[in-house]
Amino acid sequence: VVAANAHGEVFVWTCLAAPELVESSGCGYSAATLVPITKFRAHPSGTYLLKAKISPDCRTLVTTSSDRTARLWDTTTWDLTSTLAQHQKWVWDAVFSADSSYLVTASSDHSAMLWNLRTSEVVRTYTGHQTAVTCVALNDSSTGQ
């Protein structure tokens, strides 16, 4: 489990499932215990952390910020692996491709960018928006649905 706050901090827990079944309001669910793993500052003080998402392959965390960057974190060490810094204004959102090789970011600079995560380079910039691009979605599944 990953959570982030507006002050640029990321909090990470692991979930330890308990074997017993707990009854609550007539609904059964398995109990779990969250154990803190780490806490770190993902973006500088004075900037806002806006989004945190884990890649489909669970190897990378992306965080976006008012500091005009998207940052990539290794989920085994929680070390910073790359800073994507081509946007001119706040980066509001990000979404991974199904194979975790690409990332699309959305920014107040009226653009979205497609990034190759192996090279940390912009593959394509989507422009023409009249206002900020505040969210993105991507369907690149092989089934075409």
Image (tube, rainbow, N blue to C red):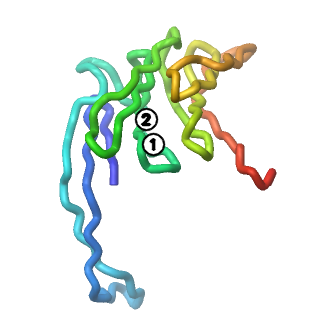
Label for residue 62?
A: 2
Q: Which of 127 and 85 is in front in this view?
A: 85
Q: Which of the 4 image quarters holds residue 20? A: bottom left
Above or below for 22 versus 61: below
Above or below for 78 versus 124: below
Mark 2 nearby-residue class (10 Å; few <14, some 14–19, many ≥20):
many
- Residue sticking out furthest to the front: 118
Q: Where is residue 16 in the image (x, y as percent from the top left)?
A: 26, 69
Q: Which residue is at 43% across, 28% downward? A: 64
- Residue sticking out furthest to the top: 88
Q: Position of residue 3 (x, y in %)?
A: 33, 46
Mark 1 nearby-residue class (10 Å; few <14, some 14–19, many ≥20):
some
Q: Which residue is at 49% across, 44% downward? A: 55
Q: Position of residue 58 (x, y in %)?
A: 44, 50
Per the image, label 1 sits on a secondary structure element best described as: strand
Label for residue 53?
A: 1
Q: Answer yes or no: do the residues labelled 2 and 1 have beta carbons within 8 Å?
A: yes
- The quadrant of the picture occupied by the N terminus is bottom left
**Precedes in sequence: disc 2 or disc 1:** 1
Q: In the image, what residue type sits under mark 1?
A: Lys
- Residue sticking out furthest to the right: 144
